[in-house]
Image (spheres, rainbow, N blue to C red):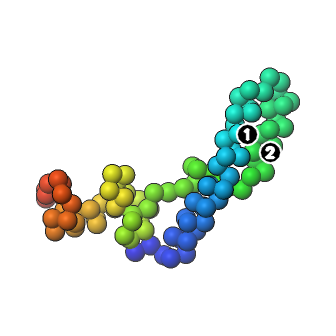
Amino acid sequence: MAKKSLIQREKKRQKLEKKYHFIRRSLKNEIRKASSLREKWEIQKKLESLPRNSAPTRLHRRCFSTGRPRATYRDFGLSGHILREMVHECLLPGATRSSW
């Protein structure tokens, strides 16, 4: 089980990412359309002034049940350990058991 503080930090990042998503996307579009280098620098400064945690690259996928940040399967939203336990208990339809 992940520490609760880390899970809360991740939720805070998700809120910030949602809040600044439109602003960040519009600034990046402006950079693409800008003709001079000076304009691009000005827009880049605005982009850098946004909070770091509002960037989508700072988000991690976490296991739905344990909050583990690594070895998370996208299809299920579960970590490998939990996924294996659920398959052995026949809780996931269509998944086959294997001894790994």
Q: Give percent across and percent down for residue 47.
A: 75, 45
Real-space Cα separation, disc 1 to disc 2, in angstroms = 8 Å
The quadrant holding residue 52 is bottom right
Q: Which mark is residue 46?
A: 2
Residue on which the image places disc 1: 27
Q: Is residue 98 left or right of residue 37?
A: left
Q: Amino acid at mark 2?
A: Lys
Q: Give percent across and percent down for residue 10.
A: 55, 64
Q: Is residue 88 above or below residue 28?
A: below
Q: Is residue 74 left or right of residue 12?
A: left
- Asked whether the viewer can see residue 71, the reply is no
Q: Which mark is residue 57?
A: none
Identify the residue at horizontal 48%, vertical 75% (top origin). 3
Q: Give percent across and percent down for residue 61.
A: 45, 57
Q: Is residue 30 above or below residue 45?
A: above
Q: Are marks 1 and 2 in contact (CB under 8 Å)?
A: yes
Q: Is residue 6 left or right of residue 22?
A: left
Identify the residue at horizontal 51%, vertical 70% (top origin). 7
- Whichever of labels 1 and 2 marks the residue nearer the N terminus, that label is 1
Q: Amino acid at mark 1?
A: Leu
- In the rendered image, the quadrant that contains the N terminus is bottom left
The quadrant holding residue 16 is bottom right
Identify the residue at horizontal 83%, vertical 24% (top origin). 36
What element does badge 2 sit on? Answer: helix
- Asked whether the viewer can see residue 11, the reply is yes
Q: Nearer the viewer, residue 26 or 38?
A: 26
Q: Is residue 41 left or right of residue 97?
A: right
